[in-house]
Amino acid sequence: MLRRLSVRNLAIVEDLELDLGPGLTVITGETGAGKSILVDALSLIAGGRGSSDLVRSGATRLTVTGEFEVDPEARAVLAESGLGEGETVLLRRELAPDGRGRAYVEDEPASVRTLARLTASLLTIHGQNAERELAEAGSSLELLDAFAEAEDQRAQVAEAAAAWVASREALEALEASRRDRSARLDLLDYQTREIEAASPAAGEEEQLQLERSRLVHADRIRRAGERALGALIEDEGSAADRLGEAARAFAELAGIDSSEEAHLEEAEELKRRVSDLAAAARDAARGIEEDPERLNAIESRLERLRQLQRKYGVSGGELAELGLRLKAERDELTNIEDALEKRQAEQQRARAKYLEAAGRLSRKRRQASPRFSAAVEKELRTLAMEKARFEVTLEALEESPRRGGLEAASFLFAPNPGEDQKPVEKIASGGELSRLQLAVLSVAAGRGRRSQTLVFDEVDSGIGGRTAEVVGRKLRALAQRDQVLCVTHVPQIAALADHHFCAEKEEVQGRTVARVRMLAPKERIDEIARMLAGEKVPETALRHARALLAEARQ
């Protein structure tokens, strides 16, 4: 659901904030007051094409911001893009007078394509590009599947398609390995033999470097040990001598004052620690025997390990692990025929599972398509299109792991008697297409189709009276499930709304500015009366407006 819409510097809209709720919301107003500008704003949020013509004259930037409640499909897109995981999402689109634009998700830069992906499950605009929406095979199949209550089967097909693709890619990768098997095996044999000959061990390089350092600095180690030993115990006035004197003094003090016993214990502990340090110094003073042969061996071993590390682009601790990986790959290639047979069997099982799931979905679609066509025609008759004919056709596609199944759907439509049915993209009238969309959505409503924000523009084109009321009630029925926003000129539709906004324009400092505001109950009566009678509103129009609103509440 769209919670809030903010528009800055779009055509004659200077600064606009709308808080929107669930149910049916209508936007009315005089021609040219800016009603359809809101549809343009939502089109930008949905990733539609931006034009510099939309930027208000004299403004440096056009900005449209929408706050949406997030459904699971949009949440998955957000997670995939690393753009947040909350219950709502803030989408923003900006355009400059030179036509350059930017898009944002949660104030983070994003592509227009990301906006389009996010809003695909959140927002649908009907009326603009209606023929394209109805002609899209994916959308047609989704509506048919909703009518057929085949959402579970559709999900199973998508899952099976993904599994088939994964198994096929794994098989293709193994087949590519087999084609290059001989050369790759020769290389792996050479590499594993070379690494195995070196027999690198975990932590070996660090141990060798420590031993090398001791051998190189043997004389310094010995002399440092001797100095430490002398200072600790051997030299006159050594630490041991001084601590011995201190300990004897504390012993005398403790004999006089028992509170000094703790200090005596500390002095004795220091003597023990000096003794331990002296033992370590004695070991160092005894020295490490100089061993040129051992030092040369260590240098050679380290150089060999470093050569292999440079050659294979690994660090010291990774060489042994690399050897194990190369050996595992060599063993797999050696037994590649067994692995290929296993992969082929897996791919065949995945294919069979997909075809079985897609077959079930196809049967359900073919059973539902005549009923779907008849139901849409019935809806069209209630929308003043008594002679219109509609048919959904299914075309089998070549076998392939498609998420949508094994067929494409097309909507054929003839709005007037005596005309041949044509694909909906070849129907010229926007009003007819809007009513067709309304009929299709009404048929599919409540049958598994996901809830979203539906925007209708021109749905009331060329209708009035009883038909207008029928259109309004169908919009209200849709609004039980979806949030419906409708730009309308028809009072019967406006009277049925849960929320009523009015677009007005005024002159401010010599410039035209559009305002959109929520109408209070009394203002709503006045606006519907104006829609009925025009600028001069007689009392009869006010009574009629009150009657329409009263009837709508029943």
Image (tube, rainbow, N blue to C red):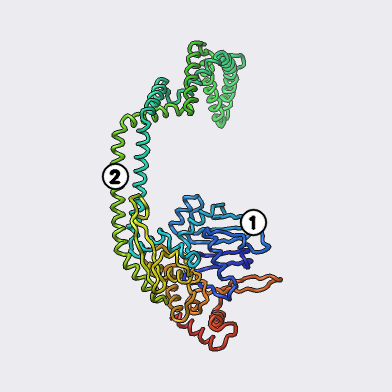
Q: Amino acid at mark 1?
A: Asp
Q: Where does residue 257 sit, x and y in percent of width and height?
A: 57, 30
Q: Where does residue 503 sit, x and y in percent of width and height?
A: 58, 73
Picture quadrant of residue 18: bottom right
Q: Foreground: 383 or 340?
A: 383
Q: Would you call the spot at circle 2 few (<14 residues within 10 Å), some (14-19), or many (20 or more)?
A: some
As helix, strand or loop, the secondary structure at mark 1 comes to: loop
Q: Would you call the spot at circle 1 few (<14 residues within 10 Å), some (14-19), or many (20 or more)?
A: few
- Please report contact status of discs 2 and 1: CB closer than 8 Å, yes or no: no
Mark drawn on residue 349: none
Q: Where does residue 138 sit, x and y in percent of width and height?
A: 40, 58
Furthest toward the right, the residue is 509
Q: Which residue is mark 1?
A: 98
The residues tagged by marks 2 and 1 sit, at their Cα atoms, a distance apart of 55 Å
Q: Foreground: 62 or 80?
A: 62
Mark 2 vs mark 1: which is more N-terminal?
Answer: 1
Residue 384 visible (yes or no): yes
Q: Amino acid at mark 2?
A: Gln
Q: How many badges with numbers are in the image?
A: 2
As helix, strand or loop, the secondary structure at mark 2 comes to: helix
Q: Foreground: 354 or 424?
A: 424
Q: Where does residue 189 sit, x and y in percent of width and height?
A: 38, 24
Picture quadrant of residue 40: bottom right
Mark drawn on residue 348: 2
* Position of 108 relative to 288 (above/below): below
- Label 2 or label 1, whichever lies nearer to me, is 1
Residue 1 visible (yes or no): no
* Residue appearing at x 50%, y 64% in the figure: 2
* Position of 251 relative to 381 (above/below): above
* Residue appearing at x 59%, y 60% in the figure: 51
